[in-house]
Amino acid sequence: MPLRPLLFGEIMDGGFQTIRRNAKTMFGSALVVQAITNALSGVTTLGMLGIAQPPVGGFTTQSEAMQYLGPILGALAGILGISMLALVLSSILQGVMAIPVARSALNRRTGFKQMWSLARSRIWSLVGFGFLVLAGSLLFFVALFVLAALILTGLGPVGLLLVLPLGFGAVVAYVWVRTKLLVSPSAITIEELGVFAGLRRSWTLTARNWWRVFGITLLVGFMVGVIAQVIQIPFSLASGGLTAVFSPHPSAEQVTTTTVVLLVISLVVAALVGAVGFAFQTSVAALIYMDLRMRRDGLDVELLRLLETGEDPDGVPGRRGARHAGAQSWPPTPGQGSPTG
């Protein structure tokens, strides 16, 4: 990528080029996480297949109702647990995968083992960040749900006039905060910061750049979502057609077997597509971090120096002296880098 503040197209192209040059490292790591979460989701889904249908006339006793609702509540708890695990793992992996992105700025490839070796000292900080984000998100939405329930209980249907604007405002606030903290994992890993120092660093870097960061991440997320759907829709249609052709009048056992086979294939496809999408989104987030540091701290000057001298070829660009970068002011002093791009 150009060693100067980046344009939108350069960030997008840099994301693709980083994955292409470090395919085994980035795609392999993302695929491991996707495989774990998708496998757990598959187990939960298969467990739900065995849940019996509710009786037509309703439940006659409380024990009968609990016997039916128990597995459903267990499955919902499992889905919630998997979602929380995915959030923590993705937070950790986002920080780890910032390393090959930073090294790609100097045209340096990063092996799978090398990436995890360079990130080893930051794992616990990333774990702490992941659980902090998880706890904050749960607390936020639980508090919002309780407040909405209290309003509806006290005011009845009229309370919707308050709950709907409250919900919209809460979503806006949540998106605003998540955007402000987007580059925290990259800062924790590359600058070797603690959890709260990484949060503060991200908050500072995104100052005066919130709309730009939000716009890029929103567009990238939309692109990844559309591409994933385009890939999976033909598969879904084909699987339904094959089922109708080979088993036009299936028995209950054939239905179960077909469902399991299609579920496994669907999870495999989803894992592959999700890994590519996650690797690209993570690469873009790390490039946004590099761009913000070039705009604010003159990181481009340091990268040019490393490129010319070939110094620290096995290290992480931007890591040396990074703890003092946050003390620098905006706009940069002469020679620190161009604020435009």
Image (cartoon, helix red, strand yellow):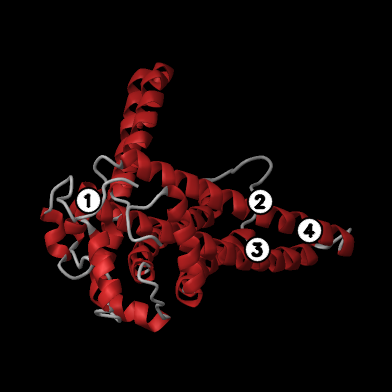
The amino acid type of the residue labelled 3 equals Ser
Q: Is there a contact, CB below 8 Å, between mark 3 and mark 1?
A: no
Quadrant in the picture for the N terminus: bottom left
Can residue 64 be seen by looking at this rendering? no
Circle 4: element type: helix
**What is the number of the mark on residue 296?**
1
| Nearer-N-terminus badge (4/1) | 4
Q: Which residue is mark 4?
A: 238
The amino acid type of the residue labelled 1 equals Arg
Position in image of residue 303 (x %, y %): 27, 66
Q: Is there a contact, CB below 8 Å, between mark 2 and mark 3?
A: no
Position in image of residue 319 (x %, y %): 22, 69
The amino acid type of the residue labelled 2 equals Gln
- Seen in the image, is 109 located left or right of residue 310? right
Select label 3 or label 1 by which is in front: 1
Front one among 64 and 30: 30
| Nearer-N-terminus badge (3/4) | 4
Q: Neighbour class for label 3 at 10 Å: few (<14), some, many (≥20)?
A: some
Q: Is there a contact, CB below 8 Å, between mark 1 and mark 2?
A: no
Select label 1 or label 2 by which is in front: 1
Task: Please determine whether, in this image, residue 317 is positioned above or below residue 111.
Answer: above
Q: Which residue is mark 3?
A: 266
Task: Please determine whether, in this image, residue 178 is positioned above or below residue 189.
Answer: above
Q: How many marks?
A: 4
Select label 4 or label 2 by which is in front: 4
The amino acid type of the residue labelled 4 equals Ala
Q: Which residue is mark 2?
A: 53
Task: Please determine whether, in this image, residue 145 is positioned above or below residue 76.
Answer: above
| Nearer-N-terminus badge (3/1) | 3
| Nearer-N-terminus badge (4/2) | 2
